[in-house]
Amino acid sequence: MSRGYKTNLWTLPRVAALIKELTGVQYHPGHVWRLLGDNGFSCQRPERRAIEHDEPKIRRWKRVEWPAIEKVGEEGRTLVFIDEGGLSTRPTRVRTWAPRGQTPVIQEKLAAKGVAGARC
């Protein structure tokens, strides 16, 4: 539920704006903190998960692809892992409001362009 925002992060100013939009009542963001806390919400660091995350594909890769890659090393051939470096425009430290005890999950597009499908 992003309500037109670019991300699903619920900051105090966003919650205050939503309250005003839905009820017409304006709260200062500092007061919204107390309202949320009194109603069972807490400020939390969300878990990040790639939108592209596909558990069945990961299991298949571990079961089929990785053993074939390991075999290359066992045969005495050189195995090279390539990683891409770069800068991210995503914030590194984010927090959002969620019900206590329910860690929010923020799904992000994590796939990068570059060397893809390179095989030995």
Image (tube, rainbow, N blue to C red):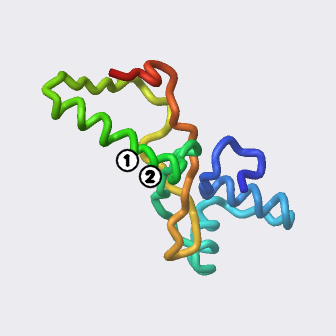
The answer to whether residue 59 is left or right of residue 38 is left
The answer to whether residue 19 is left or right of residue 10 is right
Residue drawn at point x = 53 percent, y = 72 percent: 102
Q: Give percent across and percent down for residue 62.
A: 37, 47
* Residue at numbered disc 1: 62
Q: Residues within 10 Å of mark 2 (few under 14, many from 20)?
A: few
The answer to whether residue 74 is left or right of residue 13 is left
* Residue at numbered disc 2: 59
Q: Give percent across and percent down for residue 43.
A: 50, 64
Secondary element type, mark 2: helix
Task: Using the image, determine if residue 32 lies above or below residue 96.
Answer: below
Residue drawn at point x = 31 percent, y = 24 percent: 82
The quadrant in which residue 78 appears is top left
Task: Using the image, determine if residue 114 lies above or below residue 59.
Answer: above
Name the image quarter holding the C terminus: top left
The answer to whether residue 18 is left or right of residue 97 is right
Q: Residue furthest front?
A: 75
| Amino acid on which disc 1 is placed | Lys
The quadrant in which residue 66 appears is top left
Q: Residue furthest left?
A: 76
